[in-house]
Image (tube, rainbow, N blue to C red):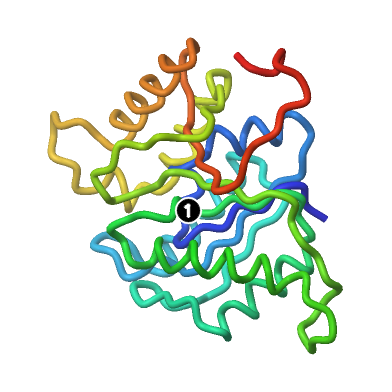
Amino acid sequence: MLDVLVIAPHPDDAELGMGGAIARLIASGRRVGVLDLTDGEPTPHGSLEIRARETRAATQALGLDWRENLGLPNRSLEPSLGARRRVAEVIRRVRPTWLFAPYWEDAHPDHVAATSLIEAARFWAKLTKTDMLGEPWYPERIYYYYCIHLRHAPRPAFVLDISPHWNLKRSAIACYESQFLVGNPAGSATILDRLRDESAYWGRMIGVEYGEPFASREPIGLRDLRDLI
């Protein structure tokens, strides 16, 4: 069903960490979906209804092929066996070639738990002789996007050129008004300003206008060095 499944701890994490990559993948003809693990509430200016509305708007802005929310508990996400089973069953249902998960080091406990949960579910999804729903499936690759609360200087495995898609990423993030635009002090930099600067930094690292960094625990193979920027 999907070429790419992005799994996010909360609504907006996928857009923040790799909204440009999502837009680029869709533009190249790949089918991309997002699985949000929690509803992200409570937050200072949000509600379940507001967050659901904002998520629908961001989904439409990006042109995602598929999106679901697993409904796991926000602020107390755990890589439990029950949660692992539910994520594995989604993987077996949508059958992605690539998985994207949050970077494995973070100050936010939900993000760290999400990464552990996703990695375990990827393994479980291929199991036979189980009562899990769906047929066995094992995504070929898992990559990690940076959407971190930790003051960490990333050392990515690769940086993707998102220059043609930065404005679309910005538009998708701006849909989450309750999270990023409400309550911002007048005259101060918004998260959109900071994200633009970060994307410009990573773009400069590879000689383009805007970029997004990604990590990998496994070696990345190239068929030809001409694929390098």
Instruction: Reply above or below: 138 against 158.
Output: below
- For disc 1, the neighbor class at 10 Å (few under 14, some 14 to 19, many from 20) is many
Q: Is residue 131 left or right of residue 75?
A: right
The answer to whether residue 9 is left or right of residue 161 is left
Residue receiving disc 1: 102
Residue nearer the viewer, 107 or 224: 224
**Image position of 132 with respect to 163: above or below:** below
In the rendering, at what x and y percent does residue 101 appear? 54, 54
Quick one: quadrant of the N terminus?
bottom right
Direction from residue 47 to residue 171 in the image, left or right: right
Image quarter of the C terminus:
top right
Relative to the observer, which residue lies in front, 130 or 175? 130
Residue at (33, 53) in percent of width and height:
178
Give amino acid for label 1.
Answer: Pro
State the image coordinates of residue 2 (x, y, percent, origin top left).
78, 52
Residue 14: image location, x then y, percent? 51, 49
138 and 69: which is toward the camera? 138
Quadrant assignment, res 152:
top left
User: What residue do we see at 60% from left, 61% from top?
Assistant: 35
Q: Looking at the image, how many numbered discs can be counted on the residues?
A: 1
Q: Secondary structure at mark 1?
A: strand
Q: Residue furthest bottom?
A: 131
**Rendered position, 26 above or below 86:** above
Q: Which residue is painted at 76% across and 84% down in the image?
A: 132
Residue at 50% x, 82% y is 80
**Quarter residue 25 falls in:** top right
